[in-house]
Amino acid sequence: MRKKRQAGAGLSPKLMTGLVLLALVMVSINLRPAITTVAGVMNQVPGVLGLDPALLPLLGTLPVLAFGISGSIGPWLARRVGTGRAVSLALLVLAAALIIRATVPALLLPGTFLAGMAIMTASVLVPQIVKANRGSGWWTGLCTMGFGLGAALGAGLVQPLERAFGGNLSSALAVWAVPALLGAFLIHRSGGRPTAAPITAGTVTGGSATVTPLRRQRTAWAVTAFFGLQAMLYFAITSWLAVYLVSRGLAPAESAALLAWFSLAGLPASLLAPVLAGRPRILRIMAPGLGVSVALALLGVLMAPVGLQFLMVGILGIVQSAGFGLAMALVVIRSSGPQTAGKLSAMSQGLGFALASLGPLLAGLLHTWTGGWEVTFWALSAEAMVLAGAGYFAIRGPLVSVEQSNQAEQAAGKGSNPTLVP
């Protein structure tokens, strides 16, 4: 009876693998609309939801700040209820937060923070699930493409949804709880059952010595720096790109459409970057090269005339999305096993997003202090050059490892069914 109740019971290995991958992609799609829907209507928020305009930089920063604070929740919860159930619970909380912040104006900021925590809880577990299922670069690519697709849908559909709801912005924001509920259902059905607790650092298995903590592994810090810097750029761009384009003379609807285009243009790159990263010769060029490319693309958006913004925003979306795809791939590629991937994911995303939370805030403050956007874009371009350096070091150190023994992983490999391990 117990076996019948387990998720995926009776399904063939190939079908189960497909169900896990589908669930992961659906989860990924839900991990950006909470941010880009608000970014696409940032100029409307004070009038519709009653937020003090001076708090707009804080509204853009809160989700990312929540990412940095809640990085350890995902692995902690997964050890207790299983990875699938942990992700499912996170999406349920996300759905509730999306409804609360849109329907109760006084809870806009707390609801946004809660949504960020839920997103982070689910996000850190995606690389661990990929590694546990021995997913290829295509797995990581499809997941990162899901992030980009969700971001594009959030930015591109918020204003059409507002019109469809008769001008009700609150409904256009709250409706994104529906795909979050669907994602929660799919990831739970695909294998959200409790599993045995993983081997953790500080124990000894089969006579092996205690492993080196992540904080003492230089490659782990390089991967974390790369993840944090590209995320800092991403959230600064998505928070203020539409506002910048309005300042250049575009209508709010056109600016929101270009913000959606920023994400859509990057979808192929977010899919292909993890695949290409699996080839060492390409990886050696790609990791530092993407930072340089982002810097040049940012300056292109700043200097290009309005008529060329579609092209320049598209180029920026391509290189920025490739950077995110590479960041997710590095967590998997530079880890020795699923246990390490989970811990490195928590470290790189937790500390990385703590750093990234400064992006929207500093970009907004620089704009306020200078009264223009030139200093902001030059500062972001300089950061992209630092990203290039982080990419260089992330691929040249030894593999990150907190695995006590590969015996458990080898034993798991004897089975044919994919699993969502904690």
Image (cartoon, rainbow, N blue to C red):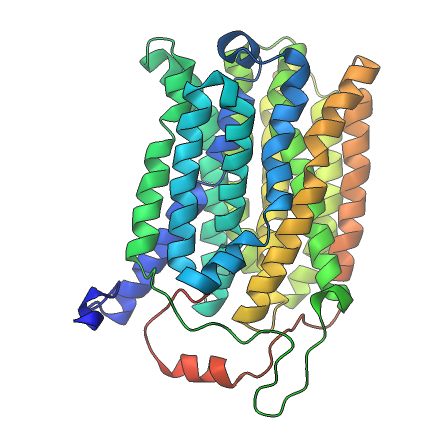
Closer to the camera in the image, 340 or 118: 118
User: In percent of the image, x 42 and y 79: which residue is there?
Assistant: 412
Residue 151 as seen in the image, left or right of residue 72: left
**413 over 311 or under it: above or below:** below
Q: Is residue 230 visible?
A: no
Residue 171 place in picture, x, y as percent: 37, 19
Closer to the camera in the image, 7 or 130: 7
User: In percent of the image, x 36 and y 12: which residue is there?
Assistant: 163
Q: Is residue 361 visible?
A: yes
**47 over 289 or under it: above or below:** above
Residue 403 place in picture, x, y as percent: 60, 77
Number of marks in the rendered image: 0
Residue 337 place in picture, x, y as percent: 55, 73
Closer to the camera in the image, 403 or 204: 204
**200 over 51 or under it: above or below:** below
Residue 270 as seen in the image, left or right of residue 236: left
Residue positioned most to the left: 1
**315 over 218 or under it: above or below:** above
User: In percent of the image, x 76 and y 28: which residue is there?
Assistant: 362
User: In percent of the image, x 67 and y 65: which residue is there?
Assistant: 281
Residue 290 place in picture, x, y as percent: 70, 47
Quarter of the figure that contains the N terminus: bottom left
Residue positioned most to the bottom: 207
Closer to the camera in the image, 20 or 173: 173
